[in-house]
Amino acid sequence: MLGRIFGWTSGATIGTFFTIAKRGSLVGTDEFGNRYFQSRDTTSYDGRRRRWVIYNGYADASKVTPDWHGWLHYTFDEPPTEVPLPRRAWEKDHLPNLTGTPMAWRPQGSLAAEGKRPAATGDYEAWRPE
C-alpha cells in the first residue's frame, strides 16, 4: 500500500489512479502489459486530448512499442487497437532497452562477456610521429 502512495517507479501512485478515474479513459493495452489512456476532455493547452501510458512494472520509456509510441506522440490519430501498424516480414519483435541487465549484448572481447580478453593477434602497429 505504501508503495502505491509514494512509489512511482513500479507503476502508478494512488493520486494517478484518482486522476485517471476522473479525467481518463482506457484506450488499450500492449503485449508488455502497459496501459494507454486518453483524456475525456480537450482542456490541454493545444486543444488536443491528452494521451499517456501507465507502465506495467518499472517505468521505462523503451518498453513502449513503435505503434503505441506513434499514437502517444499524435503521429497516428487512431490507436493500434483500432488500426494496427502494418508489419513487414523483415521486422523483428520490439524489445525494451536491455542495457544494464543480464540479457544485454556483450561483444566479443568484452570483460563482461567471459571475464577475460582474448590474446592479441599482433596485427596492431603503434603510431609514431615522424
Image: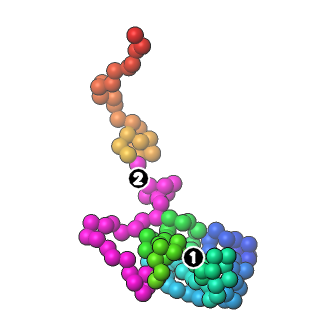
Q: Residue at x 48, y 81 (%)?
A: 77
Where disc 1 sits, the SS reads strand
Q: State the residue in front, 77 or 24.
A: 77
Q: Quadrant of the N terminus?
A: bottom right
Residue interval drawn in magenta: 80-106
Residue beneath disc 2? 105
- Residue 82, given in percent of the width and then of the height, sits at 42, 87
Q: Residue at x 52, y 72 (%)?
A: 73
Q: Which dot marks residue 5?
A: none
Where disc 2 sits, the SS reads loop
Mark 1 is surrounded, within 10 Å at the Cα level, by few (under 14), some (14 to 19) or many (20 or more) other residues, namely many
Q: Which dot marks residue 53?
A: 1
Picture layout, residue 68 above or below residue 114: below
Q: Residue at x 73, y 77 (%)?
A: 5
- Residue 67, given in percent of the width and then of the height, sits at 43, 74
Q: State the residue in front, 95 or 113.
A: 95
Picture layout, residue 99 above or below residue 67: above
